[in-house]
Image: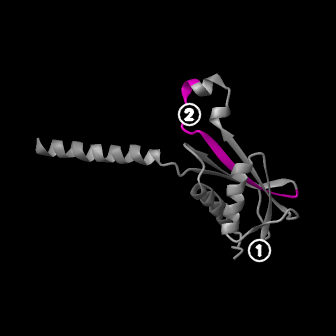
Amino acid sequence: MRRFKNSWIVVAVVLSAFFLSSCKDDSLFVKKYGELKERNISSFRFKTDNYYLLDKVVRSFKRYGYKEDKNSKYLISLTSHYVINCKNPVVHAIGADFNGFVRLSLIKDKKEIYRIQKDFKTKVTDKMIDGVVKRLLKDLGIEPAR
């Protein structure tokens, strides 16, 4: 009987760890459309309709040593969506696991080379944006600009 009680404790601990880990949102969705031939990139230009988030993204790239250059051949397009702004009644009835997403796309010569998206539950933080930018640079093998 004592063995049976201990196995329930193990099951409870495992289930707790599973459910608690699902609350942590580290998921990044990545899509590569081509290879980046140039690795020594020092600047990007930026485009968005959300200037609050754009400021966070530009600051993050600057922390990694990159600069903003309106003449750069590499464009970072920032797209964001907040579920609060969504008018779809099905989404509101079912609920959502997230409040929105932030997507960065790297574009050269009007062709998307790479896309990365991060869902968020509460708000967009500098740490979250830094993680997305770091992953973009790592996946594309871009040399640090420092």
For the question of whether residue 140 can be seen, the reply is no
Number of other residues with Cα within 10 Å of mark 2, as a class: few under 14, some 14 to 19, many 20 or more: few
Element under label 1? loop
- Kindly identify the amino acid type of the residue bearing the numbered disc 2: Ala
Mark seen at residue 40: 1
Q: What is the x, y in percent for residue 12?
A: 28, 43
- Is 118 magenta? The answer is no
Residue at 77% of width from left, 58% of height from top?
34
For the question of whether residue 127 can be seen, the reply is yes
Q: Which circle, 2 or 1, is nearer the viewer? A: 2
Whether tag 2 and tag 1 are in contact, CB under 8 A, the answer is: no
Residue at 69% of width from left, 62% of height from top?
59
Q: Which residue is mark 2?
A: 96
Above-or-below relation of 51 to 83: below
| Magenta range | 93-109
- Is 105 magenta? The answer is yes
**Quarter of the picture holding the N terminus:** top left
Residue 13 in the figure: left or right of residue 21: left
Q: What is the x, y in percent for residue 66?
A: 73, 69
* Foreground of the two, 144 or 53: 53
Number of other residues with Cα within 10 Å of mark 1, as a class: few under 14, some 14 to 19, many 20 or more: few
Residue at 56% of width from left, 34% of height from top?
96
Q: Residue furthest bottom?
A: 146
- Kindly identify the amino acid type of the residue bearing the numbered disc 1: Asn
Q: What is the x, y in percent for residue 123?
A: 58, 46
Count of all numbered marks drawn on residues in the image: 2
* Foreground of the two, 128 or 28: 128
Distance of label 2 from label 1 (alpha carbons): 40 Å
Q: Quadrant of residue 93?
A: top right
Q: Quadrant of residue 71?
A: bottom right
* Of pointers 2 and 1, the one earlier in the residue sequence: 1
How is the model colour-coded? one colour
